[in-house]
Image (spheres, rainbow, N blue to C red):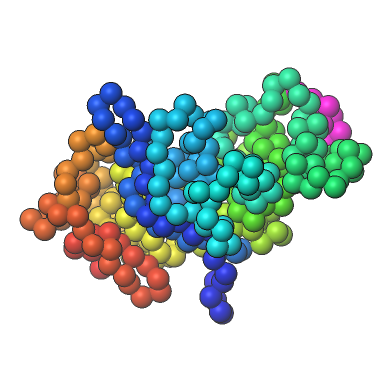
Amino acid sequence: MSGSMPETLLSVRDLTLSFATRMGPLKVLRGIDLDIAANEVVALVGESGSGKSALGKSIVQLLSPPFVDGRATLSGSIRLHGEELITAPAHRLRAVRARDIAMVSQDALSGLNPVMRIGAQIAEAAQAADPALSAAAARRDARDMLAAVGLPDPDKAARDYPHQLSGGQRQRVMLALAAIRQPQVLIADEPTTALDVSVQARVLALLADLQRQSGMAMLFITHDLGVVANIAHRVAVMYAGQIIETGTVAEVFTRPRHPYSAGLISALPEAPAHHPRLAGGPPDLHNLAPGCAFMPRCRHAAMACSQPPPLKPFPGGAHALCWSPLS
């Protein structure tokens, strides 16, 4: 990406999410800062349990009542085009979900109404985004969108129920549900995890095409670094509820600053031999060390790491949350 600075569509600042548990508050997100610009794809990567999905759901307020029982506490700032969403009333959040921010998850079956035909579900989403749209026009748009996402027989797919489609077909239906709203921001949460390699490639291509055609911003959540280079402009690396490194795909993949990022990249077949392999596993969020959460697994750990690390900037807008970045 070059030229003038693109417009920031989504801005997250100091976002903290905690759940009340019998062992006390469990902080799942800790001071998240993240910007996504128009026409930009940011990949959010990290091991399972790092907080990636929690961040995605928090952005669309799916961890607040009525979606959860009220034990979640979310604080900080989430701004869409400068409008604060954290304190937005329920009716405004419903409108944001209907038109402005869409989410596609890896579990497509649970995201679809099992007793409603596919075409009717997509048409309903189209009318929610544009109440002036007639029922007939919404049905036509739904059929056209099913064709656009590559369903081989869109008329039949529109008449089918979710259980009658394959996993790859249901994932494309979820993309159609998101795309028909023409959202400003798409959050794709592990959308290809349960798919075979050939279907995964088609879904990734569909996502990239939809993003390029509409100019929307996209947060692509994955634990599979192998797909990131094919779809993203920038990368944000998460660990223990924090974003510990950001940068362009080229920067993070070829010159990771945080030891954890280097460990993740070491698992790639084309990774440089000098990148150290990750040892151990993710920390218990109930018993985090007072300093750097990665310290128990880090071969570069020093005395300073017993204190919370600073966020260090690098040329080009990259950052690393580390006392001793690798470069």
> Seen in the image, is 78 located left or right of residue 244?
right
Image coordinates of residue 52 in percent, x first then y, are: 43, 44
- Res 235 quadrant in image: bottom left
- Res 147 quadrant in image: top right
Query: Which quadrant of the rendered structure holds the C terminus?
Result: bottom left
Q: Is residue 268 visible?
A: no
Mostly what secondary structure, the magenta segment? Answer: helix
Image coordinates of residue 38 in percent, x first then y, are: 60, 64
Residue lying furthest right in this view?
136
> Seen in the image, is 47 located left or right of residue 161?
left
What are the residue bounds of the magenta stretch? 152-161
- Residue drawn at x 45%, y 45% as measured from the top left: 55
Query: Which quadrant of the rendered structure holds the N terminus?
Result: bottom right
Is 234 above or below relative to 150? below
- Residue drawn at x 40%, y 47% as measured from the top left: 75
Is 115 above or below relative to 65? above
Residue lying furthest left in this view?
303
- Residue drawn at x 19%, y 61% as measured from the top left: 323
Q: Is residue 290 visible?
A: yes
Image coordinates of residue 106 in percent, x first then y, are: 55, 35
> Seen in the image, is 309 located left or right of residue 250?
left
Asked if residue 22 lies in the magenta stretch, the reply is: no
Nearest the eye: 188 or 147: 188
- Res 153 quadrant in image: top right
